[in-house]
Every structure is written in C-alpha cells, then in structure tokens.
C-alpha cells in the first residue's frame, strides 16, 4: 500500500484532503455533541452551543479559503479538472457557512 504521493499532481490532489475531511467530520461531531448534551434548551447550554458553533464556523471559513487557494495553485499547475473540484468544495463550504450562521444566535 502506497501512502505517500510520488508525482506533483498527486501532491496537489492530496493537499485538499484535510479540508474535505473537516467538511464531513465537523458537523457530525457538532450534532452528536448537541444530541448528547440535550439539544438547544436555552440557558447556559444555548450560549455554549453558540460558542461551539462559532468555532466550527471559523473552521468552515478556513476550509473555504483553503479550497480557493488550492484551486488557484491547481489552476496555475494546469490541473483544471482538479481545480474545478476544489472550487466546487469551496462552494459547498460557503453554503454550509451560510446555513450555519443562524446557530450563532442564542437567547
């Protein structure tokens, strides 16, 4: 089994993996934590939930910027097909950020 990429194109593809993993893992961990702690019942839990959602949102923004930078590097390296995939993931990260914003509100 080969774990280290050998060509430049494999490295370009590999550099977006942590961002793709975060897009999948972070919401799962957040909603699992939210269900395990009793949901958003208000009180102190609502404040803690909003703070945790803000941390997750900042990670999504980092992913958005990471995908844009990766798409730029891949486009410069003439890997336009992989750059399109990175731009698609940047769009997904932006949409997730947009729908994640209401979770920051707490009473």
Image (cartoon, rainbow, N blue to C red):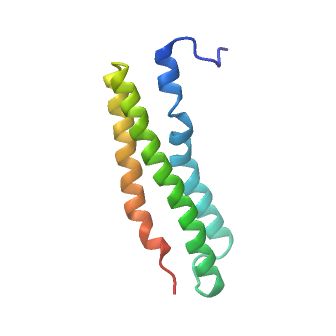
Where does residue 11 sit, x and y in percent of width and height? 52, 21
Name the spot of residue 38 as percent of width and height, x first. 65, 76
Q: Is residue 17 left or right of residue 96?
A: right
Residue at the image position 38 percent from the left and 44 percent from the top: 90
Q: How many marks?
A: 0
> Percent from the top left, x then y, of residue 88?
34, 40
Comparing 72 with 54, the one in front is 72
Quadrant where the N terminus is found in the figure: top right
Q: Nearer the viewer, residue 67 or 85?
A: 67
User: Is 32 above or below relative to 71?
Assistant: below
Is residue 26 shown left or right of residue 85? right
Which residue is at 32% across, 32% downward? Answer: 84
Compared with 30, 85 (above or below) is above
Q: Residue at x 37, y 62 (%)?
A: 98
The picture quadrant where one finds residue 55 is bottom right
Query: Horizontal and vertical percent for residue 7?
Result: 52, 11
Q: Is residue 26 above or below residue 98?
A: above
Using the rendered view, name the quadrant where residue 31 is placed. Answer: bottom right
Q: As rendered, which of 38 and 102 lies closer to the eye?
A: 102
Q: Nearer the viewer, residue 69 or 32?
A: 69
The residue sitting at 68% across, 69% down in the picture is 36
């Amino acid at each position: 089994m080969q774990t280290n990429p050998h060509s430049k194109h494999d490295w370009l593809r590999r550099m977006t993996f942590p961002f793709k993993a975060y897009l999948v893992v972070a919401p799962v961990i957040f909603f699992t934590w939210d269900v395990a702690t009793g949901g958003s019942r208000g009180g102190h839990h609502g404040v803690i939930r909003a703070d945790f959602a803000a941390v997750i949102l900042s990670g999504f923004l980092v992913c958005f910027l990471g995908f844009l930078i990766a798409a730029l590097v891949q486009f410069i390296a003439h890997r336009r097909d992989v750059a399109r995939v990175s731009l698609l993931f940047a769009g997904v990260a932006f949409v997730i950020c947009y729908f994640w914003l209401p979770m920051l509100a707490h009473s």
